[in-house]
Amino acid sequence: MKIQTVCGFGCGSSLMLKMNMEKIIKDNNFEAELFCGDVGTCLSNPCDAIFISRELAERIEGRAQVPVVVIDNFMNKQEVEEKVLNFFKNI
């Protein structure tokens, strides 16, 4: 499982989201490889899912070939955990 975390430039908030998700995934004994991407190129990066902010999700809506998980607030650890766990329960 390859999961891409996406932000505007691929090196700021997506990195924070990636690190938070890695901890959640590890703590719950899931397995996935996570990497950061930017909204401009994220659709061309091979992956199994994209985690992205609501604002940027509108730019890829309807074009992604993989599940897109929208996060309203990357800093809200409860929201991130809930959406990560829900994603893994439904795959």
Image (cartoon, rainbow, N blue to C red):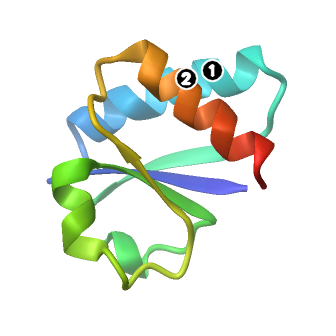
Separation of residues labelled 2 and 1 (CA atoms): 6 Å
Q: Is residue 91 visible?
A: yes
The three-letter amino acid code for the residue at tag 1 is Ile
Asked if one can make out residue 40 in the rendered structure from this viewpoint, the answer is no
Q: What residue lies at 67% left-to-right and 31% top-to-bottom?
A: 85
Observer-nearest of 75 and 47: 75
Q: Quadrant of residue 82?
A: top right
- Left or right: residue 58 versus residue 51 is left
Do the numbered discs 2 and 1 sit on residues whose CB atoms are within 8 Å? yes
Label 2 belongs to which residue?
A: 81
**Earlier residue among tags 2 and 1:** 1
Q: Residue 30: percent from the left, percent from the top? A: 80, 33
Kindly give the residue lying farthest to the right in the view shown. 29
- Residue 78, image x, y percentages: 47, 15
Q: Position of residue 36 (x, y in %)?
A: 39, 49
Q: Is residue 7 left or right of residue 64?
A: left
Q: Residue at x 44, y 24 (%)?
A: 79
Q: In this rendering, is residue 47 above or below 75?
A: below
Q: Residue at x 24, y 34 (%)?
A: 13
Residue 25 position within the rendered picture, expressed as x and y whole percent measured from the top left: 69, 27
Observer-side mark, 2 or 1, equals: 2
- 63 sits to left or right of 9: right
Residue receiving disc 1 = 24
Crowdedness near tag 1: few (<14), some (14–19) or many (≥20) residues, C-alpha within 10 Å: some
Q: Amino acid at mark 2?
A: Glu
Q: SS for tag 1?
A: helix
